Structure formats: C-alpha cells, structure tokens
Amino acid sequence: MKSISLYVDKESFIHDFDPITKLLYILFALFLPLILLSFTVSFISVGVSIVLLMAAGVIRKTIPVFSFVFLVLITVVIIQGLFRPENETILFQIGPLAMYKEGLLYALTITLRVMNIVSAFLILVLTTKPSDLVETLVRKGMSPRIGYVIVSVFQIIPEMMASMSTITDAQRARGMETEGKLSVRMKAFLPLLGPVILGALINTKERALALEVRGFNSHVPKTYLYEEKTHALSKWVQAILLLLLVGAGVWRIFG
Amino acid sequence: MNKIVVEGLKYKYPLSDTLALDDLSFQVKEGEFIGIIGKNSAGKSTLCQALVGLVPHFYKGAYGGKVFIDGLEVKNQTIADISLKVGMVFQNPFTQVTGSKMTVYEEIAFGLENIGIPRSEMIARIDYVLDLLKIEQVKDQNPFDLSGGQMQRMAIASIIAMKPDILVLDEPTSQLDPAGSEEVFQAIQSLSKQGITIILAEHKMEKVALYCHRVLLLDDGKMVDINTPGKIFSRGDLEQHGVAAPVYTRVCKELGVRKAGTSEFPVTLAEAESVLRGRKI
Ligand SMILES: Nc1ncnc2c1ncn2[C@@H]1O[C@H](COP(=O)(O)OP(=O)(O)OP(=O)(O)O)[C@@H](O)[C@H]1O
Ligand SMILES: [Mg+2]
C-alpha cells in the first residue's frame, strides 16, 4: 500500500533512537541558536543535522524537501538583499538594482535558522514511524483518542485515494473521459467527491462501532504490544542536550 | 444457567417510524450456539448490536424491554464494560480495520492493548488466533492489503483474542469462498465446544442447520420462533417469512420423507443421506 508518511524503513543507529530523544534534538536545534544568537552555532547545528541524516542513510529523501525550502528562501534573500530598510553597504549592482550587505546577512541568518529547524525535523520524520512517535506520546500521557486520529489519518487517506482510483476506473470503463485537459479532468473529478465522501462518512460510523467493541473507550490502563523503544545512550544524549541548552542560557544571562 | 436473557425488547432507530425490534423475548444458556435467521432487514444486525449494547448506547433511539448479560442489564452498563464479556464481529470486514496499525499482528493486538492485557499473554493469544483462523502467513502484511476473506478472518481473530464469554457474529463469512467459510465455521465450532456462547446471524442455511443448537427466526423485527434447526426448518410457513430451508430439507420436503419417528424433515446432508438411504425405492 502507498503510504503518505515520509518514514524510510532502514537500519541505522539514528533509527534505533527513541522518538523522545529526537524531539528533544529538535528543541535543542531550535533554541540553541536563538539563545546564543550566533551565526557559527547555527552553521554547526545545520552541519550536525546533515551528518546525522547521512548516517541514517536518508539524505537522498531530504533533497525534495530542501529544494522546496530553498525555493521559498531564495525569495527571502532577494527581497531582503534589495529592500531591507537597514541596507547601507552596496555589495554589487545589476542595472538599477543594488544588493546590500546588511540585507543579505540578515537573509542568510533566516536561511540558516530555517534550514536548521527543517533538518532537525527531518531526522525525526524520516527515521521514525508515525505510529511509533504517537505511541510514545500516548505513553507520555497524550490522549489515545488524539493518537488514534493522527495515526489513522496516515492510513485512511491513502485508502480514500485508492477508492477514488477504483471509481475513476469504473467510470472510464463506462466511457467517461477522465484524462486530457484540465477542464476534462475537473469534470471527471467532481462527481467522484460525492461517493467518496459519503462512503467515507458511512465507513467512519461503522468504524466507530468496531472501535467501541474493541475496548477503545475502556478505562482499564492501556498495555502495549511492543516494549518502549529506548537506546542505551538515550539518557546520556538527552542529558547532554539539556545541559548544553541550560549552559547556553546561563552563559547568555551572566556571560 | 442463562447467559443471555431478553425480555420484551423493543427498539426504534432515531428518525425511523417503524420498530426494528418488536417485543423479543428469549433466553440463551451458557455454551449454546444460536443462529439468527431472517430475510434482509428483518432486524438480525440490530438484534446482534442490542446484545453488545451498541443499541441503544451508540445509536440512541427509542428502547424498551430489558437485555441481561450474566444477570447485568445492558442498558445500565457502558459499551466498554459489556465488550469485556461480549465480543462482536460485524458484517463489513473493511470497516473493522482500525486504520491505526501497520500489520495484521499489531491490528489484532489493538483490542488487547485497550483492555490492558499484559504483553506475554497478548503474544500468546495473538499466536493462538492467527493459527485458529489460519492467517499466520499474512501476519506481517498491512491490514488494508488483505483480500476480503482474509480481512474477515482477521476481524474474527481480533475479537476472539479478547476472549469474550459470548461471541456475536454478524454474517462473518459473507466474503469467504465455500472452503474458507467451512474453515471459519469449524473454528467457531471449536470455540463453542470450549463453552463459549455463540450468537450468529447468517444467511447460509446449510451452515446454520449443521452447526447451531437452536435457531431464532426473525421477520420484520418480530420473533417468529426459536427452536432446534429441525423444528424451524420443518415449518410450513418459512417462505412467507422470506427464508428458504437448507437445500437438503427442501429436497426431502419435496419427496415427503421425514426423520424416522418424528414430524421433522432432515436439515443436514448427513441426516438426509441416512433417511434417504434407509428408504426402499
Ligand atoms: N443505522 C440505522 N438507522 C436507521 N435505521 C436502520 C439503521 N440500521 C438499520 N436500520 C433499519 O432497521 C431494520 C433492520 O435492519 P438490520 O440491519 O438489523 O437488518 P438485517 O436483518 O441485519 O438485514 P441484512 O440481512 O440485510 O443484514 C431495517 O429496516 C433497516 O432499514
Ligand atoms: Mg445485517
């Protein structure tokens, strides 16, 4: 079955780490540069994330994401470089347009920060099964109902897309045009929405019944099929990340 | 001991003008295997859902009379509590897939996690039902990638793993081929022999005649009769109620041969064979 999750099923020491450590890493990568306000720290942080992504063997999967992010950031660079109010020092000039140093530096900071968050997020998303992440959060006290909704969306949306294509096939078999110009496609697509949405609603009611009889609303404390995933080094990594954050905070306040 | 007691049960779905269940009363003993038959929309599924408390707790609607499970009144219990005692398998296997688990194995574990079964016990139970329903070979597949028949087996396995005292099955073999249906019925019978009370809504009359101890005939929400398969399928008014007797019974009715010493017609292949062989042609 097609999946809409980005998870890459591989074996690596990054995959072995528990979701909580990865979440903590995101917080770390997010806050450390903000606390220290240092260009170099952002730079190192992005570098570390990229090395980790390579170690997990998922770097190729990051290319589409990074390309999209770059596309957005290019506009930031251009706009800030050209029009930032603090702009003073001209770096170079193309015709009537002047690129300024202040704007470019500012854009570079933003770029680094975004890259930093995105790459830390990608470590979590690419190396953690969505269901593992949610299960961990449920263990930590998140409502199992919310957890169920999140995980089932990952499965039920591809399921709806599959039923969509079944209906399209059926209509094509009856001679309906479903390919070609955009207007033709739209015409073929709209009548699909009725059966698919109605079907999904009926399914939802029946599925709710089925969940009820499987003890979904039971008040007994839940148990889990799998043992909680932990890594021998988890506690250490978490402690070091926290210490570094606290240390940075202290240095910032008193330093 | 009576496991299930139904007294004057009446039920009307919200926004509906007619009673889906009209004044039903019957008792079921522990370990009995009861078949529910009747034409489409006779009320079979509604009755099944009344036994697990989905009627009235889930649907609301107008409810009258009483249903007792082990002496406890369903109306005063939560579905979660009832489902520890009564397991239910629905007609449509597709909507019973939770959609939150990646493999058949995990899918079966879903109910067990919810009712707090310890891990080692959970694993033992899952292995048992995978074997009972013959789906070990697909245990690592995604539940949505199964065939209709495999999904149906998985749905049954998921409920059996929760070890209910009473198992309610609503057309559990609608997606299975004849060989597959037979396998599933064998599995259900083996549970029945372990003392689990079974309630089964079914259109396959040959199976009902072969496996059920008693049969409840429904028509338009009313109970026409509850009796042994021999008595029910020998009734002269089955067709008026929209039900056809097992094919063996119809043949014997046509030939006018009854079981020796009774007014009943044979209802299973074995009965028909022994009666017909004994007859001098
Ligand atoms: N959710 C609902 N809301 C309103 N009416 C319903 C609902 N479900 C069933 N009914 C009605 O209740 C009556 C009994 O339906 P039920 O599904 O119990 O029949 P059934 O014997 O299981 O039929 P089948 O053999 O088709 O499965 C029917 O008239 C049906 O239209
Ligand atoms: Mg039904």
Image (tube, rainbow, N blue to C red):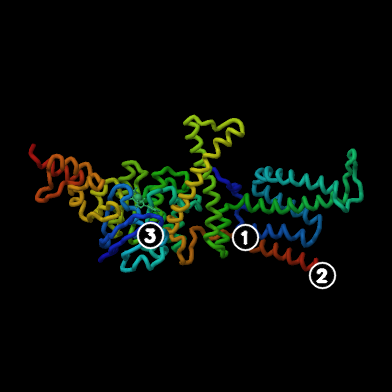
Separation of marks 3 and 2 at Cα, in angstroms: 66 Å
In the rendering, at what x and y percent does residue A160 appear? Answer: 52, 45
Where disc 3 sits, the SS reads helix
Numbered badge on residue A20:
1
In the rendering, at what x and y percent does residue B13 appear? Answer: 38, 56
Q: Is mark 1 within 8 Å of ligand 1?
A: no
Where disc 2 sits, the SS reads helix
* Residue at image coords 47%, 31%: A174
Q: Dot 3, how many residues are within 10 Å of its Cα: few (below 14), some (14-19), or many (20+)?
A: many
A9 or A236: nearer the viewer = A9
State whether residue B213 appears in this view: no
Numbered badge on residue A28:
none
Separation of marks 3 and 1 at Cα, in angstroms: 42 Å
Kindly indicate the quadrant of the structure image that contains residue A255. bottom right
Mark in front: 3 vs 2: 3
In the rendered image, which residue does mark 2 sit on? A254
Mark in front: 3 vs 1: 3
Q: Are marks 3 and 1 on the same chain?
A: no
- B189 horizontally vs A209: left or right: left
In the image, what residue type sits under mark 2? Phe
Callout 2–callout 1 Cβ contact below 8 Å: no
In the image, what residue type sits under mark 1? Ile
Question: Of all residues shown, which one is farthest toward the front?
Answer: B17
Q: Dot 2, how many residues are within 10 Å of its Cα: few (below 14), some (14-19), or many (20+)?
A: few
In the rendered image, which residue does mark 3 sit on? B55
